[in-house]
């Protein structure tokens, strides 16, 4: 028995009959002893119809008036559902976002929640009423009492935020699917329902295009430890649980705009191996990482940048104890990776023996364009050059020289106001004081072998939870960016200043001399809608950057696998690359985090790519799903 927040989408309340069915489900939950808050969306296609009306009377309707208009859709739903509950004998009251105390920014059509005043809501709950709340809306925290809407995923966001504010036992998201599936069933009909998934995994999948939950809602759940459950509106099946870690104590003030970074992590015990000028054709990554997997070497970051001519570069990091074996594998396979018969130049192997990985971590990065740019700026100001970049929804990592660790940790902790610094499994550093970090790095290097042995002990969780395909991205490449601190910071801060969110960021490993200046290529992905704007913004600063041409490719797809179980499990990347090679799919870019591997492929290969990786990890197998249960 406890307090539950239930959310029903537009389809679930799309007709009188469906509203009555929802009322019956809510009443049954109350009879089971629960206190219930219900958040609903507008009925069916109501929002689309209202947008259509606005476009008929105005070619450019103002954002404020759009909020006034669109907020009416949910008010219809809450009034009708309250009436239906009362008709069934269940006391209920409907409340708008303003009445329930959802306070937001004054940013019409895309406001973020600042706080929730739950006093009035809790009073009605104590009186035994079901409180039916209009999702997707709030009121600006100003004297003008402006109505605001939350933008995409707004009702999910409202529900999870209310659950966090009320310290609810669970937040149930009711929808027209049975829960969270291993991939898009329209692409893979045999996709299976997952019984549970971690919040970090769900953040990755949601941001890769899984539409069951919006990333903003998952972010709040993760930050405040809300138990999320995604269930079908049409059955009593248990659905999928989204499990959040035990949160650090966190104020509700600034709920969606609070500190985006929770921690700075440092792994000072890595080495980097790069293969330059490998052929740009299917199967190369599969061969390299297949050999590495046979040696049971656990690879951390993997980066493959954009091709130049018919060749590409692949770089990866390993624990320093594995450096010699990884270098031997790379040296052995390099002579077999030749280009065309007319050019038999062998791939070159470069090894950076003293490498560290510095990372910022936090679910709040999703709604804050420019966090990566802040990281790059802080490192540049500290004189730290970035060797590799890896990004995910909850972490941005940079490979740097080991001698730069002290300055990097201090700079990032200062930039993001981090008072303590949790670290990755192969490091024991707990202080952010530069006077003590160096001694702790030395200690971490000595202890790393036993730490890794412990980390590789039996972990029975499946290596991959799900696969995703994103067909709505474009890739931009900036050629010949001078290789000096501050360049990445300048590029991505400029994009952030123009409200352009960047997804995958990759910096090439090959350094080329242009007019006597060492340069690298930087590639990244954005939404297709932002591609043209991003190119224009970068072309405007190109003379200042002293870079080469800026290329755009909108005909790409990004296929990804996600799973916390891949940590400490050698060979997962090799399996993915092999599956793509066997499907004759060329990998154009690779980027990884601890729980995600993403490959950029041709748009025409997208569907085949996700089908291939879904099959190779047996995500549709009943036996596999029993492990997940």
Image: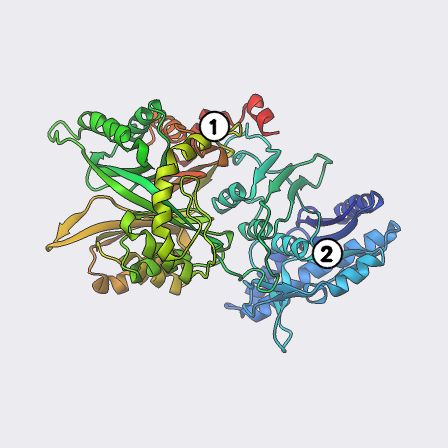
Residue at image coords 57%, 21%: 623
Q: Residue at x 61, y 49 (%)?
A: 225
> What residue would you read off at disc 2?
77
Secondary element at tag 1: loop
The residue at the point 83 percent across, 52 percent down is 85
Q: Which mark is residue 496?
A: none
**Residue 438's spot in the image, x, y percent?**
34, 50
> At 47% across and 29% down in the image, what residue appears?
614
Of labels 1 and 2, earlier in sequence is 2
Judged from this view, the residue extending furthest toward the right is 89
Instruction: Tell me the CA gap for discs 1 and 2.
Output: 52 Å
Q: Residues within 10 Å of mark 2 (few under 14, many from 20)?
A: many
Q: In which quadrant of the rendered image does the C terminus lie?
A: top right
Which label sits in the foreground, 1 or 2?
Answer: 1
58 in relation to 344, above or below: below
- Mark 1, Cα crowd under 10 Å, few <14 / some 14-19 / many 20+, is few
Horizontal side, residue 287 vs residue 560: left or right: left
Q: Which residue is mark 1?
A: 457
Percent x, y of residue 258: 53, 61
């Amino acid at each position: 028995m406890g307090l539950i927040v239930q959310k029903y989408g537009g389809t679930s309340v799309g007709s009188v009959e469906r509203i009555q069915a929802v009322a019956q489900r809510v009443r049954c939950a109350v009879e089971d002893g629960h206190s219930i808050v219900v958040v609903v969306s507008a009925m069916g296609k109501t929002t689309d119809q209202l947008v259509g009306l606005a476009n008929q009377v105005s070619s450019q309707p103002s954002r404020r008036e759009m909020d006034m208009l669109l907020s009416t859709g949910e008010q219809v739903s809450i009034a009708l559902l309250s009436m239906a509950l009362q008709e069934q004998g269940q006391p209920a009251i409907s409340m708008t976002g303003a009445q329930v105390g959802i306070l937001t920014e004054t940013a019409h059509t895309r406001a973020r929640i600042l706080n929730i005043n739950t006093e009035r809501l809790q009073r009605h709950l104590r009186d035994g009423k079901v409180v039916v709340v209009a999702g997707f809306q709030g009121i600006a925290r100003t004297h003008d009492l402006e109505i605001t809407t939350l933008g995409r995923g707004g009702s999910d966001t409202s529900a999870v935020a209310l659950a966090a504010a009320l310290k609810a036992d669970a937040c149930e998201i009711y929808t027209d699917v049975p829960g969270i599936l291993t991939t898009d069933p329209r692409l893979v009909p045999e996709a299976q329902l997952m019984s549970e998934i971690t919040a970090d995994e769900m953040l990755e999948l949601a941001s890769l295009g899984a539409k069951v939950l919006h990333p903003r809602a998952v972010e709040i759940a993760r930050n405040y430890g809300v138990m999320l459950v995604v269930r079908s509106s049409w059955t009593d099946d248990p659905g999928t649980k989204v499990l959040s870690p035990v949160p650090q104590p966190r104020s509700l003030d600034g709920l969606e705009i609070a500190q985006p970074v929770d921690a700075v992590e440092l792994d000072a015990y890595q080495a980097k191996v790069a293969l330059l000028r490998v052929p740009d054709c299917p199967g190369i990554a599969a061969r390299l990482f297949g050999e590495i997997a046979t040696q049971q070497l656990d690879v951390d970051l993997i980066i493959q940048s954009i091709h130049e001519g018919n060749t590409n570069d692949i770089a990866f990091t390993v624990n320093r104890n594995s450096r010699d074996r990884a270098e031997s594998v790379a040296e052995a396979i390099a002579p077999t990776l030749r280009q065309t018969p007319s050019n038999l130049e062998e791939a070159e192997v470069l090894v950076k023996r003293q490498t560290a990985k510095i990372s910022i971590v936090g679910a709040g990065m999703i709604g804050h364009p420019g966090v990566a740019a802040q990281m790059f700026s802080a490192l540049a100001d500290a004189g730290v050059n970035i060797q590799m970049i890896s990004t995910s929804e909850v972490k941005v990592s940079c490979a740097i020289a080991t001698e730069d660790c002290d300055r990097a940790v201090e700079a990032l902790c200062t930039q993001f106001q981090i008072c303590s610094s949790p670290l990755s499994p192969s490091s024991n550093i707990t202080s952010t004081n530069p006077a003590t970090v160096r001694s702790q790095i030395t200690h971490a290097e000595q202890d790393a072998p036993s730490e890794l042995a412990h980390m590789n002990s039996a972990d029975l969780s499946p290596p991959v939870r799900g696969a995703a395909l994103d067909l709505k991205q474009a890739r931009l490449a900036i050629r010949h960016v001078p290789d000096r601190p501050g360049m990445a910071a300048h590029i991505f801060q400029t994009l952030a200043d123009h409200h352009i969110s960047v997804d995958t960021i990759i910096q090439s490993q090959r350094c080329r001399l242009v007019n006597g200046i060492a340069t690298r290529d930087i590639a990244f992905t954005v939404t297709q809608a932002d591609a043209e704007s991003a190119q224009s913004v970068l072309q405007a600063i190109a003379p200042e950057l002293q870079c080469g041409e800026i290329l755009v490719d909108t005909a790409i797809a990004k296929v990804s696998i996600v799973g916390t179980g891949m940590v400490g499990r050698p060979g997962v990347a090799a399996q993915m690359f092999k599956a793509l090679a066997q499907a004759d799919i060329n990998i154009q870019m690779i980027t990884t985090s601890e729980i995600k591997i993403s490959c950029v492929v041709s748009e025409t290969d997208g569907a085949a790519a996700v089908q291939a990786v879904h099959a190779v990890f047996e995500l549709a197998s009943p036996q596999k799903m029993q492990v997940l249960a």
